[in-house]
Amino acid sequence: QLQLQESGPGLVKPSETLSLTCTVSGGSISSSSYYWGWIRQPPGKGLEWIGSIYYSGSTYYNPSLKSRVTISVDTSKNQFSLKLSSVTAADTAVYYCARLGYDDFYMDVWGKGTTVTVSS
Amino acid sequence: SYELTQPLSVSVALGQTARITCGGNNIGSKNVHWYQQKPGQAPVLVIYRDSNRPSGIPERFSGSNSGNTATLTISRAQAGDEADYYCQVWDSSTEVFGGGTKLTVL
């Protein structure tokens, strides 16, 4: 059964770069049938898509975050990663990684999420 | 950018039918997906491509999409259905989520 697990620092200082990794187990990240994505949820608010990546490295980003976001993939480790630069308190959120269907981009498998707080 | 509009809250009596709407310009021409999120948990896909249920999702969950409105219908509502529900579409190379609807089962 496919599982996704987010990992990374739970506390990041303002103006620094947030870095998270999603490890995929029980399946291959190199499958041609899926994209892999990051979604976040600020406290008490709704879901916000950050971006998605294909195993080949092709990416889509949320236009509102694009200037600060980099998503990369490491097929040898079955992982993909998120970097969000110049963070502020507004980037405090639960960050989820998820698998997306290649054709319709729905998210059918989610990680449990990891809380990231931006504070000095 | 494309926007999806959901009611903030919907209430339903135990055992009755709940309908959660998702409005968007000509949303009927898009594939709509629905997620259920319970407090402290990750979202779960309950409907994909307008009306398809993933394995393990009860038949009580159904979906429809036409014109400017997509609808998630939950029949015979149970206490365990109380959650936030989000609709989602793919538009212009961007994932778009609705603002979410809190379903209360009375």
Image: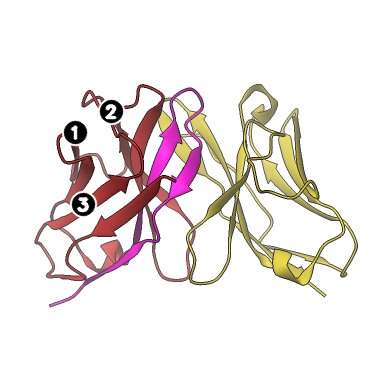
Chain colours: A red, B yellow
The reply to whether discs 2 and 3 touch (Cβ–Cβ < 8 Å) is no
Residue holding disc 2: A30
Tell me which corner region of the image, top left, top right, bottom left or bottom right, holds residue B89: top right
Identity, as a three-letter code, of the amino acid under mark 2: Ser
| Secondary structure found at label 1 | loop
Residue drawn 40% across the image and 40% down it: A99
Residue at image coords 25%, 69%:
A89
Tag of residue A75: 1
Q: Quadrant of residue A79?
A: top left
Q: Nearer the viewer, residue A28 or B77?
A: A28
In which image quadrant can residue B67 be found? top right
How many numbered badges does the structure rendering display? 3
Residue range corresponding to the magenta coloring: A95-120
- Amino acid bearing label 1: Thr
N-term-proximal mark, 2 vs 3: 3
| Disc 2 versus disc 3: nearer the observer | 2
Work out which residue is located at the far bottom of the displayed protein and give it.
A120
Is B13 positioned to the left or the right of B64 in the image? Answer: right
Compared with A81, B69 (above or below) is above
In the image, residue B57 lies at what x, y percent?
68, 48
Q: Are marks 1 and 2 on the same chain?
A: yes
Q: Indicate whether residue A72 is drawn in magenta.
A: no
Q: CA distance from mark 1 to mark 2?
A: 6 Å
Identify the image quadrant of the C terminus of chain A: bottom left
Q: Residues within 10 Å of mark 1 (few under 14, many from 20)?
A: some
Judge by depth and name the residue closer to the eye, A81 or A59: A81
Q: What residue did someone put label 3 on?
A: A21
- Residue B73 lies, in percent from the top left, at 79, 48
Q: Which mark is residue A90?
A: none
